[in-house]
Image (cartoon, rainbow, N blue to C red):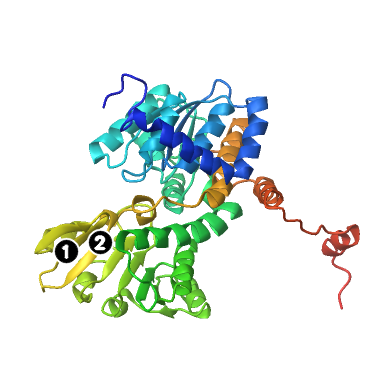
Amino acid sequence: MDYKMGYRVKDIRLAEQGRKQLEWAQMHMPTLMGIKKELAASKPFKGRRIVMMLHITKETGVLARTVQAAGARIALVAGNPLSTQDDVAAELAKEGIMVYAWRGQDESAYYENMRKALEIKPEIIMDDGADMHAMVHQEYRNLKIIGGTEETTTGIVRLKAMEVEKVLRYPVIAVNNAYTKYLFDNRYGTGQSGLDGIIRATNIMISGKVAVVAGYGWVGKGVAMRLKGHGARVIVTEVDPFKALEAVMDGFEVKRMSQAAGEADLFVTATGDKNVVTYSHMKMMKEGAIMANVGHFDVEIDVKTLRSRARSERELRSHLREFKLENGTRIYLLSEGRLTNLDAAEGHPSEVMDLSFANQVLGALHILKNHGKLENKVYNPPPETDERIARIKLEAMGIEIDALTNEQKEYLSQWRYGT
């Protein structure tokens, strides 16, 4: 593979299947397709250069097509080495998008592809995890970027740290903070796709298992809910007392990881932090315990120490590796500790990414329309944009809701009337 053709994908001959995948996704993304139709007519991104660093799935393909139809020149790279759907990447490359990604790229290629994308000198960056934002700030300070968007909790944490240190050089819309993103994508999307990945990789029965969910943010809530729905006894581990209390009130057991490590069959990390499951925890695990991660980066499970300390390691199934520990116990790791829902499964359903990616494109449009007016800060999406997306989605689903009467509006805006 090389860059001579203006793209770098696994096999351009996969494009036909990728086109079918995109067709299927578009059927289930009516919100984004409606926005695409509107923007294709007005071309607000005409002549603009946009780098997109996202998981290259069929849903991301629909987003890329939308931004391209709005007039932008796009370079697209993968937000994770294992998340690219090669057939979709091939089709997007055939459609004139500069795609530099394939499933299973190593770390060197991951960063080389990022640098290749930046050769278009982007004005807007659409990111997932903030790796591209970080690279631009560390190595490409000469680029004149007017702003960006960020998809994930992990990325927003990094960008807020940059803001606090006063090194953030342009405004960023925190797409993840939209209600229509985190209430649905993080919870229902990861809840379903995470469990889908675990089942595809293992084919275990969830019912009757003891499962630990590390972290009770929106992602953890979704995973715990789906595991419980499949009949698992779910234990939540947390460091936040409010989230821990919420988990208890939702009917889950809450324990320390050290307390839960010896009794669980399945561990799922969803915190966005590192070393949540340590080698010390692994040594407490029972024979056959399975570890999976649905947090953004591969740091939540201490894979490095596991590999260095285990007596043996082998691939037992696709996406599943067996490790024999020093004490003789065999435990199992899914997807090398990376995102199981994107490696072993297909990522979130199109219906939920319809909302998330509507926020991405409208966030980028907000950056463009307000160029010169925004400070170098992390901004939440405008509430009116969030509400617009929710209303479009409801309309597409054939659902009607009530509207406040003038009398009700007046009542809610006053203070004089009580009991």
At numbered mark 2, what does the secondary structure look like: helix, strand or loop?
Answer: strand
Q: Residues within 10 Å of mark 2 (few under 14, many from 20)?
A: many
- In the figure, residue 207 lies in which quadrant? bottom left
At numbered mark 1, what does the secondary structure look like: helix, strand or loop?
Answer: strand
| Left or right of 316, for residue 85 | right
- In the figure, residue 26 lies in which quadrant? top right
* Residue furthest right in the image: 407
Q: Position of residue 269 (x, y in %)?
A: 36, 63
Name which residue type carries label 2. Answer: Leu
Residue 99 vertical placement versus 27 (above, below): above
In percent of the image, x 11 and y 74: which residue is there?
327
Q: Position of residue 362 (x, y in %)?
A: 60, 39
CA gap between label 1 and label 2 equals 8 Å
Residue closest to the eye, 319 or 386: 319
Residue closest to the eye, 139 or 12: 12
State which tag comes first along the sequence, 1 or 2: 1
Name which residue type carries label 1. Answer: Phe
The residue under label 1 is: 323
Residue closest to the eye, 126 or 102: 102
Q: Position of residue 256 (x, y in %)?
A: 34, 77
User: Can residue 141 be seen at all in this image of the molecule?
Assistant: no
In percent of the image, x 32 and y 37: which residue is there?
102
In percent of the image, x 47 and y 68: which residue is there?
226
User: Can residue 239 be seen at all in this image of the molecule?
Assistant: yes
Tags 1 and 2 in contact by the CB under 8 Å rule? yes
Please state, as top left, top right, bottom left or bottom right, where the N terminus lies in the image: top left
The residue under label 2 is: 333
Residue 330 vertical placement versus 410 (above, below): below
Q: Position of residue 353 (x, y in %)?
A: 53, 48
